[in-house]
Image (cartoon, rainbow, N blue to C red):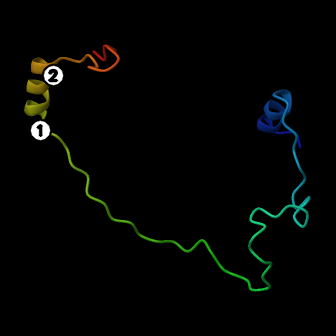
Amino acid sequence: IKSKCVRLLLDQGFTIASQGAGDDEVALFPDEGQTTMEFVEGAAMQVVVNRYERDRQARQAALRLHGCRCQVCGLDMA
């Protein structure tokens, strides 16, 4: 494999297993028995969420009042 990502991983000391190597040797959850059933996964699902935006004037007023400095670590985010 000659990809840049693989070279970077190898340079960092990682080893690259070939696809399918050791599938029968490693049991991720040994307490679960082997099954002969096949499951199909990966169906597309639509997820709908609400996104809330702050009022720009309210945000500016809060920044003027409280500033841009973290009250815990003191980091200035201005």
Q: How far apart are marks 1 and 2 (CA)?
A: 12 Å
User: In which quarter of the view is residue 10 placed?
Assistant: top right
Residue 62 picture location, percent across and down:
12, 26
In which quadrant of the rendered image does the C terminus lie? top left
> Is 36 located above or below residue 2 in the figure?
below
User: In which quarter of the view is residue 15 placed?
Assistant: top right
Residue 35 picture location, percent across and down:
78, 82
Closer to the camera in the image, 75 or 34: 34
Residue 14 picture location, percent across and down:
84, 36
In which quadrant of the rendered image does the N terminus lie? top right
User: In which quarter of the view is residue 37 placed?
Assistant: bottom right
Q: Mark 1 points at which residue?
A: 55
> Is 61 located above or below residue 35 in the figure?
above
Residue type of the residue flagged with mark 1: Asp
Could you tell me which residue is drawn at 23 percent across and 18 percent down?
A: 68
Bin the neighbour count of mark 2 within 10 Å (Cα to Cα): few under 14, some 14-19, many 20 and up. Answer: few
Tell me whether circle 1 and circle 2 mark residues in contact (CB < 8 Å): no
Give the label on residue 63, or none: 2
Residue type of the residue flagged with mark 2: Leu
Could you tell me which residue is drawn at 31 percent across and 14 percent down?
A: 74
- Tell whether 8 sits left or right of 25: left
Viewer-nearest of discs 1 and 2: 2
